[in-house]
Each structure stands twice: as structure tokens, then as C-alpha cells.
Image: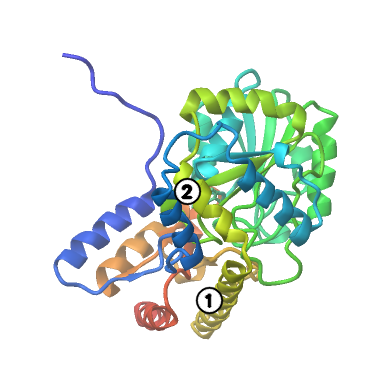
Amino acid sequence: MSKALSTTVQPFHVMDILARCKQMEAQGIDVVHMEIGEPDFPTPEPIIQAGMQALQVGATQYTSAQGLPELRQALSNYYLNRFSAEVDADEIIITPGASGALQLLFAALLQDKKKLMLCDPSYPCYANLSRIHGAERIAVAVDESSQFQITLELVERNWQTGIAAVMVANPSNPTGTLCDVDELKRIAEFLEQRDAYLIVDEIYQGLVYTGESKSLAAAADNVFVLNSFSKFFGMTGWRLGWLTAAKKHIPALDAIAQNSYLASSTISQHAAIAAFNADTQLILEQRRQQFQTRRDFVCQALADMGLTLSCMPQGAFYLYVNIAKLNIDSFDFCQQLLQEQALAITPGCDFGQYRANEFVRLAYTTSEDRLAEGMRRLAEFIA
Ligand SMILES: Cc1ncc(COP(=O)(O)O)c(C=O)c1O
């Protein structure tokens, strides 16, 4: 009999929490969900209509691995109009979600050099996927002093030979904080001199509430930007994202895409073109404002409980809350909160190790009514 497969890759604790929620809900318990990073809004109607039309006209065959030229052109226009960034349609690769873009980049960048620098805390797939690619992770502890973001000084201090790339998310998951784009450009320059690359995950870039939303796309030859239709565009299940890269890198990435998945979903690509029409943009802007209202509501409710955030998240839909003063490990806190109050949130240990036992992540991806109920339960639990 063959041996069962095994892996050192860790599952998400949030998935265990979700499974526990399902069991509780099957018993008729009303669970408030603030654990999962998925918007509660449906895909905007114009995108759904465009997807249905694509099906009706029989757009069901492969596209090129790089993706539909019309969609890449729409993205190129979007960068120009919204971010004043000149990204040629040929410098864009359509991928199966931002996850697909990460796979392409890690396959391309981590094959020879085997080290990836990333923040602790950060989105868990960065560490897990780089592990799948056999890479070593250089985790840089980040905290309130740098808005939980990497700085040039931190990169310099933690630098070692063999690092292929530095991975950042702007805004960050789990903290929702932003990184200064000029600082990122300085980091890119530092990396350029060391023949290394900067990967910027801008998946939450459409959801920025304070100041101007800026993109690093086309900022330098050694910068890769990834993004997705999942979060801001409300298309998680359509599995569609993209990657921007300098033209000279496209052939290698295209070859990896061809061999990994042939092409992204054709129907989703046709549907996504409608994400950039005026009607859809209006819907998305209204949703962005709703997220901002939710953020402000939850921040105030937390402050009323004595849980003041040390840095105000400027984007995404997460709050990374320090619960150290409650004298309980954050993992136990999440378990007990779910058990006793049926409120689901995520423990810090899903995002790294550095002070993970002090933090929990709250996602404001549910309606204001449900958030109010969640905050009532949290206050009761703490009391
Ligand atoms: C920071 C970040 N990057 C990438 C992803 C992957 O998203 P998708 O593959 O749905 O585009 C997520 C999903 O939660 C995320 O939070």
C-alpha cells in the first residue's frame, strides 16, 4: 500500500474555526461571522450580466495564457485613469486570483535563490506557498512602530545573501495598514542593487479609506504587483486576478502560466471587463464607503470596550486588535469567544509568530446589524 501524503504546510486556524461554526449552526446556534476575509456583497450585477452573455455567445474555450487582450487593455486604462500609472496591456498577465499570481512569481523567483523576506504578521499563504516551493522564509517582525509594515531600515537590518525577493501587502492583511509608496520605491532600489525583486500585493488597494490609493505598478523593472477581482470587485468565486511585470519578464511568466494552468477562466475574464464600466465603478465606490462606515463603527465599539487600536487601519476590511491586557492567549480567546458567545474571529497565530498570542483579527465583512451584534457579544464576553 502506498504511504499517505504528508506536508509541513500548516492549515489555517480560521478554517478550523469556520468548520466549528458550521457545526454550531447545524445545531441552530446563531453565529456572528467576523473571521473570514470575504466581502458579504454579491458580485455587481453588470459583471454577472457580462458573464452570462459570455456563456450565451459560447465564449467557453481557452484564452491565451496571458489573458484576454480586451481585459488587459481595460486594466491598463484603469491604472492610467485611477493611479496615473503607465502599465502597458502587454505588461499584464491575467491569473486565477491573486493566488495564481503568487504561484507564478514564486515559481519564477524562488527556483534558484531560495529565500523570501516577508513580514510577521502577514497573509499566511506567502509563507506556506514559499515553503511548497522549497524556499526559506526570512520573517521580519513588524509592529506598531512601523504601522505593521516593512521599512528600508528593516530590510537592511535583516538582509542576508540568497534572498530572491521581499514580499509586502499594501494595504496589509491582517492589519489593514498602508506602506508609504516612496519607502517601497527606496526598498526596490536597494533590492535592484542586490539583484533581488519586490513583490507588492495590492489586492486590497481598491479598499483604501484614508488618503490617496497609490499603486506601485510599473514603478521599476524589479517590482511585481499583484491584484485580484476577488475583494474590491466582489468576485471571490470567479477566481480571477492579475500581475503586472516589466515586459522583459513576461515570456518567463507566460511559460510558467502555460504549463501551470494553461489559462484563467474565459467566462470570468469576459465578465471582468464589465468591472470597469461606470455603473460597476459606482456600485464599488458605494461599497467602499460602506466598508469605511463599518470600520469606523467597529473601531469606536472596540474603543468603548477599552480596546483602542494603536494604529488606525487605512484600508482592507480587517482590524488587528491587541488583547494583551485581557491576560489571555489570543488562540484561547478566539476559542472561548466562539464557544460562549458564538462570535467567530481569527487568532494572531494564523499570520505569524511575532506577538501572535497578543492579537486577534476582526473582519468587518458583514452587515452593520451583524457587526453591532458581534460587538455586543464581544463586550459581554470581555465583561
Ligand atoms: C493579502 C491577500 N493576498 C492574496 C489573497 C488571495 O486572494 P485571491 O486568490 O482570491 O485573489 C488574499 C485572500 O484572502 C489575501 O488576503
What number is the disc on residue 149? none
Of residues 159 and 358, the one nearer the viewer is 159
Q: Amino acid at mark 1?
A: Leu
Q: Is residue 241 left or right of residue 92?
A: left
Q: Is residue 119 left or right of residue 374?
A: right
Residue at image position (24%, 74%) is 30
Above or below, comparing residue 17 to residue 317 in the picture: above
Q: How many marks?
A: 2
Q: Amino acid at mark 2?
A: Ser
State which quadrant residue 80 falls in.
bottom right
Q: Position of residue 12 (x, y in %)?
A: 39, 47
Badge 1 is on which residue? 307
Above or below, comparing residue 159 to residue 150 in the picture: above
Using a 10 Å C-alpha cutoff, classify the residue at mark 1 as few (fewer than 14 neighbours), some (14 to 19) or many (20 or more): some
- Disc 1/disc 2 C-alpha distance (Å): 41 Å
Q: Position of residue 315 (x, y in %)?
A: 63, 65
State which quadrant residue 344 falls in.
bottom left
What number is the disc on residue 268? 2
Q: Position of residue 71 (x, y in %)?
A: 61, 47
